[in-house]
Amino acid sequence: MRPAGPPAPLFTLEALTQAAVIFSMGVAIIISNVLIIATFLNARGSRDVINIYLLSLAVADLLVGVLIVPLSVYPSVVQQWVYGDVVCRMVGYLEVTLWNISVFTFMWMAVDRYLAIRKPLRYETLQTRTRCQCWMVFTWISMSMLCCPPLLGFNPPIFDPDAYVCMLNWGDMWAYSATLAILVLGPSLLTIIYAYTYIFSMYKKLRSGVPIHDKEYATALAEALANPTHIMSFVLILTFWVSWTPYIGVRLWEHFTASRLQVPFLHFALVWLGVLNSFWKGVILLTLSPDFRLLVRFFCLTVCCRGNKSRLQAELMGMDMDD
């Protein structure tokens, strides 16, 4: 008997289409987040601390595009996982860790926007670059450690044959899973809801003409509310949850009903709809953030005019101060 070789590719239209979709998404995610990271790193003179959170999100999304998405292309063709249990376990760990990092980063972003409205006169004192960088380091380290137990467990990882992704096996760790959800999702969702409820209520109050007796505070508040970063950050957070809520809802329904929905391409579509969120950040920033468009322009000019970088940096700082 001849030894079993590697699985033969299934060059069906369905398999090739799914592989093309996954590959295209991976390329789009990498290009989008490389642009975001390069733009922020190139503009080190920018004083907006929210860029630290956006940079953290872009790094997490870039890791998704480089380390997770490409490993699903070939399995979608051969209809099985071919890289072994160790790689499958590591991919599942990265998925959970990077997802939780994004959730926590959105929470800090909501806090930042809340403080910009709640304490407009003290915002720059409260939200320093060093403090925000410390929060991001804490987030990456804590999420990496919190997601470790399933990685080190004895349960084999799970390969989803419909979505062609590996996941950690949380089967006998429901107590830990519930604790992790409470520690991550609970504070994040409550903070985001409270922060943006307050922000939009202040929008409404200011537009309704409610008198504010402290003129200095009223002026600072009006300037803070005029910043388009509030809407941009809200759209980023909303897009993330809109992308992942259908998948989370289906998984919860299947868990509590102990049955799997037999709808063609449902799991494939829901998983990759969530992963596609890693691409939309670049589109949202270009659409809703004038500051980011300015930084992209500065980056493009820097690439094209390397000898004039100092002059371009000075012009950027001057435009930022005028704004």
Image (cartoon, grey):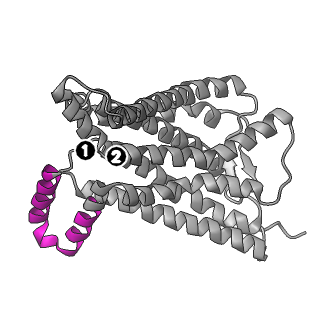
Position of 305 relative to 232 (above/below): below
- Residue 322 or residue 53, whichever sits in front: 322
Q: Quadrant of residue 180?
A: top right
The amino acid marked with disc number 1 is Asp
Q: Residue at x 49, y 43 (%)?
A: 237
Q: Nearer the viewer, residue 48 or 116?
A: 116
Find residue 286 and report its horizontal and vertical position in percent: 37, 60
Mark whose residue sits in front, 1 or 2? 2
- Asked whether residue 170 is drawn in magenta, I would say no
- Quadrant (top left, top right, bottom left, bottom right) of the N terminus: bottom right
At horizontal 25% and vertical 44% (from top left) the residue drawn is: 48
Amino acid at pointer 2: Thr
Q: Please identify the dominant SS of the magenta region.
A: helix
User: Please, what secondary structure does the residue beneath circle 2 have?
Assistant: helix
Q: Which residues are magenta?
A: 295-322
Above or below, 234 relative to 154 = below
Q: Position of residue 296 (x, y in %)?
A: 29, 63
Residue 73, relative to residue 119: is it above or below?
below
Identify the image quadrant of residue 205: top left
Residue placed under numbered mark 1 in the picture: 48
Q: Quadrant of residue 50?
A: top left
